[in-house]
Amino acid sequence: MDASKNHRIDLKGIVVIVGNYGSGKTEVAINLAIFEKKAGTDVRVGDLDLVNPYFRTREARTLLKDHGIDLVLPPKQYLYADLPILTPEIGGLIQHPGELAILDAGGDDVGATVLAALADHLRGRTVQTLQVVNPFRPFTDSIDGCLKIRREIEAASKLTVTGLVGNANLIDDTTPSDIEEGYEFVKRFSAASGLPLSFITAATDLLHRLDLGRFTCPVLPINRQLVPPWRRSEPDY
């Protein structure tokens, strides 16, 4: 079944993607940007992950560029530095987000602290902050764990989480039943937290094996873009 015939992902303005380490938030950010661009939305992406040395949005910069998506990065000399570098370009992105500006923050509360430095830029603006949850990862395999991660990210970022993204996967070993189990889990988390479920994800090669009609939220197709550095084909910046 064509995912586009399912519920439409409806995101506009500034969307901040947060989550714990291993949640797959950066993969979600990249695929969301490409999905929305293909749907005709003008998309820009800001890479705010200043913690993880490997799985950052910037690793897919060529792919995003090929799709006509503007990616805002730190200066070249600081591209792989683990420093709290916030460029004027990020401020400009927030001031003029266009149709959709996706900000990919670092993992856990440590990575989210950079968002607090943007408080002045974000003040008075409508911001959607989405917490990505993979129930097959440590610390988010229980509702209490997910709630704890949410509280820690909110305290560090000075932002309020406004929605959830279910990203249930076991990478290459994911099965349709894993997607369905993850969906039921994140629905329970939605009920416990009072937060809406914005969408879930599923690898594109699994979509035809899923009954999309059973999901009451949109499904974002995922093409895995990020790989460990020892498997990376794209050269450094």
Image (spheres, rainbow, N blue to C red):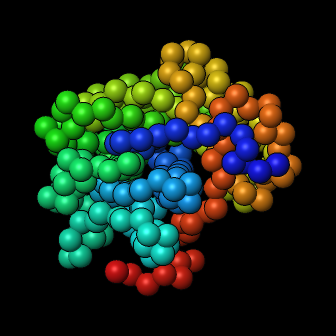
Q: Does 123 appear above or below 34? A: above
Q: How far across and how far down the image is residue 7, in percent? A: 66, 37
User: Which of the two residues, 68 or 22, is positioned nearer the viewer here?
Assistant: 68
Residue 60 visible in this rendered orientation of the protein: no
The reply, left or right, for residue 147 in relation to residue 200 is left
The answer to whether residue 90 is above or below residue 180 is: below
Task: Give how far across and how far down residue 96 sits, in percent.
Answer: 24, 50
Residue 32 visible: yes
- Which residue is at a point 26% across and 61% down the rendered structure image? 82
Depth check: 158 or 147 in front? Answer: 158
> What x and y, as percent, mark residue 200?
63, 39
Numbered label tally: 0
Q: Residue at x 69, y 48 (%)?
A: 4
Residue at image location 82% in from the left, 49% down from the top: 1
- In this rendered view, identify the residue nearer to me: 74 or 207: 207
Q: Position of residue 48 (x, y in %)?
A: 31, 54
Where, by quadrant of the figure, is residue 45 drawn? bottom left
Residue 90: image quadrant is: bottom left
Looking at the rendered image, the quarter that the C terminus falls into is bottom left
